[in-house]
Amino acid sequence: MKKTISKLLTQSYKKLCDSNIESYILDSQIILSYLLDKDRIYLHTHKFEEVNEDIERRFNELIEKRSTGYPIKYITKSCEFMGMTFYIEEGVLIPRSDTEILVEAALDKIDKGRILKIADVCCGSGVIGISIAKLTLGLKCHMFDISDKALEVSRVNTKKLNVNERVEIIKSNLLNYSIENNIKYDLIVSNPPYIEKEEIKNLMRDVKDFEPKEALDGGSDGLEFYRKISYESQKCFNIGGFLCFEIGYNQRKDVCYILKENNFINIECYKDLSNNDRVVLGQFAP
């Protein structure tokens, strides 16, 4: 006997609640909406509508998956960022809303100066570089990552957001490609791995068990990639170029010191909506 939307949701609420999924109501509705290709309002206005057996089977499979902590965004393969919808899948870091502060800081510098070419280092799913390209005119962007999965997902998103003519996706260990080819930028932006290695085990289950460790692990003190990118970037700037980092809430002092040690001046910090330090940027002055 076919089950109604209401019956399926009621069962899934209990399953996810018993599995300690705090957002059990929202997640259940998102999954069913995704499978039905309807918005969540539809679920409420058609709660007595019967669901076919194939949808019911897939729904139960995905609810079971979510009950293990598997991230909802990997299930729907979709993520909202800067008011745009990006493709996402397992193997790349799920974008966080805090990272929008990094994009806004970069856009602030672009608005105030002549910035024509940028690089997004450790690009992951591509949301940072693609958002900047989408929200500006004429700007060219190189996006670098060492992960084949990240490059694959970034390519999907450049086409999805229609910026593939202005964004080039390149496999590179940090800025090696630019250094080897003597390419210069006006702005380099990065959300590198910055979690201390020993802290990864203390992260939320959704993150530590399912998101790629290489996108989280910032070395013993969480600062490994800030040091490497700051050092390498000195060979990759046009005059007056900016380096813009997302940071952990407690890393402002250390990252500012790293920038100063690598010939950056006019160092600024931007806070997120929770009033935590979230972005540090500096201007290269050789």
Image (cartoon, rainbow, N blue to C red):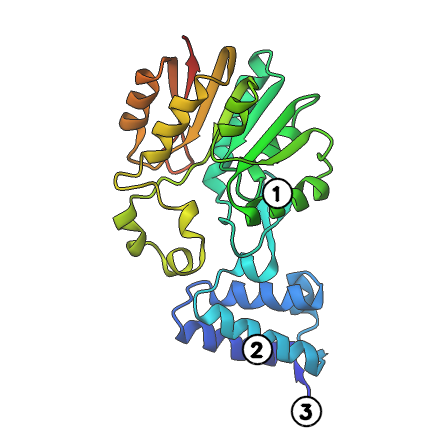
The kind of residue on which mark 3 rests is Met
Indicate which label's residue lies in the foreground, 2 or 3. Answer: 2
Q: Quadrant of residue 285?
A: top left
User: How far across and how far down the image is residue 82, in percent?
Assistant: 58, 38
The kind of residue on which mark 1 rests is Ser
**Residue carrying label 1:** 154
Depth check: 208 or 230 in front? 230
Residue 42 lies left or right of residue 229; in this view the side is right
**Residue carrying label 2:** 60
Q: In which quadrant of the rendered image does the N terminus lie?
A: bottom right
SS class, disc 2: helix
Report the Cα–Cα distance between label 2 and label 1. 30 Å
Badge 3 vs badge 1, beta-carbon distance below 8 Å: no
Q: Residue at x 36, y 45 (%)?
A: 217
Q: Quadrant of residue 116?
A: top right
**Residue carrying label 3:** 1
Q: Which mark is residue 30?
A: none
User: How far across and how far down the image is residue 255, in percent?
Assistant: 32, 27
Depth check: 159 or 30 in front? 159
